[in-house]
């Protein structure tokens, strides 16, 4: 898709994001977007029916009568988006809807960011490939979100110049998120997951934060006759493949299914919620359904 068309579609997303924001606030996600932190507000006299566990023993001893602690819920939540900008996200084989994996990831990033804005949350991002490329400190407001989205859009144009930067390091991005976030937050990792050794860091992050793994995938199978050249966009390795043979097609399909199953298993083991999002799927509909019907737990959905 041309950059101009992408930008026009992104500009319209704030309208669509209103519905997504409502679904993000529904069900099990309501407590997350209200904030899970509690800060001390004041102490008041104990009244019949108060939870004895909330008694402030120091204040009670000082005044000679029972007092209980009152807390104020922190309404502000930080949302951090980890966006994979590596070459494999820009690979060819564009679908009939004209979207590459990166373009689908870009739409998802913008949707989540605009939806968070409607709930007055802070939004930040980390762009990564083999290294961390850019860091956007979480902030509120349309201006900071547009700066984030426009920066992400630039990666649509310069992928050819970055082919030397083969590989993506999800573990490094997760570690960066852990260092950046000071309080409990919602982390959304958007990638095709062509990376290794990220599972331990995901588990570490999930112990302190709520995490969603959003895997972008291209459902198209190889349908070319004869011998074709395949290139791994993460390593640059090329091989000749007999794409026309049934045995090759069967092995290719088996590999894709095994990879998907392994990804699901590792997400569940780490404690992250997970959603597979096809490049042929309408991202707003899929995300609204996911946030509206599933809380942050060990769930997996396909779209």
Image: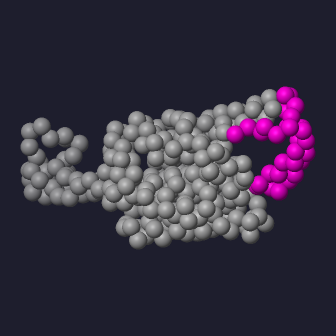
Nearer to me, 208 or 119: 119
Kindly indicate the quadrant of the structure image that contains residue 234: bottom right
What residue is at 22 percent from the left and 53 percent from the top?
A: 71
Kindly indicate the quadrant of the structure image that contains residue 170: bottom right
Which image quarter holds the N terminus? bottom right
* Residue 115 vertical placement versus 26 (above, below): below
Does residue 135 appear in this view? no
Nearer to me, 193 or 157: 157
Q: Is 179 displayed left or right of 261 in the figure? A: left
Pinpoint residue 218: horizontal percent, then vertical percent.
Answer: 66, 43
Q: What segment carries the magenta color?
A: 220-248
Pinpoint residue 275: horizontal percent, then vertical percent.
Answer: 54, 40
What residue is at 40 percent from the left and 35 percent from the top?
A: 293
Nearer to me, 59 or 31: 31
* Residue 16 vertical placement versus 50 (above, below): below
Q: Is 258 displayed left or right of 186 in the figure? A: right
* Residue 228 vertical placement versus 44 (above, below): above
User: Was residue 225 drawn as part of the magenta stretch in this picture?
Assistant: yes
Q: Is 217 displayed left or right of 124 in the figure? A: right
How many numbered tags mark residues here? 0
Pinpoint residue 193: horizontal percent, then vertical percent.
Answer: 66, 48
What residue is at 80 percent from the left and 51 percent from the top?
A: 232
- What colouring does the structure picture have? one colour
Does residue 63 appear in this view? yes
* Residue 173 vertical placement versus 261 (above, below): below
Pinpoint residue 291: horizontal percent, then vertical percent.
Answer: 42, 42
What residue is at 48 percent from the left and 60 percent from the top?
A: 10
User: Was residue 240 drawn as part of the magenta stretch in this picture?
Assistant: yes
């Amino acid at each position: 898709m041309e950059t101009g068309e992408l930008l026009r579609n992104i500009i319209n997303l704030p309208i669509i994001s209103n519905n997504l924001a409502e679904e993000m606030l529904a069900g099990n996600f309501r407590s997350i977007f209200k904030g899970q932190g509690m800060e001390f507000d004041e102490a008041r006299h104990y009244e019949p029916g108060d939870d004895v566990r909330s008694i402030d023993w120091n204040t009670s001893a000082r005044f000679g009568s029972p007092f209980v602690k009152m807390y104020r819920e922190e309404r502000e939540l930080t949302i951090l988006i980890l966006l994979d900008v590596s070459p494999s996200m820009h690979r060819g084989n564009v679908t009939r809807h004209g979207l590459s994996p990166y373009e689908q990831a870009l739409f998802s990033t913008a949707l989540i960011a605009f939806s968070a804005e409607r709930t007055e949350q802070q939004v930040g991002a980390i762009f990564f490939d083999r290294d961390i490329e850019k860091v956007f400190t979480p902030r509120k407001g349309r201006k900071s979100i547009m700066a984030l989205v426009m920066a992400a859009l630039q990666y649509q144009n310069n992928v050819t110049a970055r082919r030397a930067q083969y590989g993506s390091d999800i573990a490094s991005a997760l570690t960066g998120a852990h260092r950046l976030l000071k309080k409990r937050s919602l982390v959304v990792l958007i990638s095709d997951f062509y990376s290794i050794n990220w599972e331990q860091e995901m588990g570490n992050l999930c112990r302190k934060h709520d995490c969603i793994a959003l895997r972008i995938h291209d459902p198209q199978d190889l349908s070319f006759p004869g011998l074709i050249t395949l290139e791994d966009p993460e390593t640059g390795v090329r091989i000749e493949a007999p794409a026309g043979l049934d045995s090759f097609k069967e092995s290719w399909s088996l590999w894709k299914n095994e990879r998907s199953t392994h990804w699901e298993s590792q997400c569940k083991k780490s404690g992250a919620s997970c959603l597979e999002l096809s490049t042929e799927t309408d991202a707003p509909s899929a995300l609204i359904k996911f946030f509206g019907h599933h809380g942050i737990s060990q769930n997996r959905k396909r779209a």
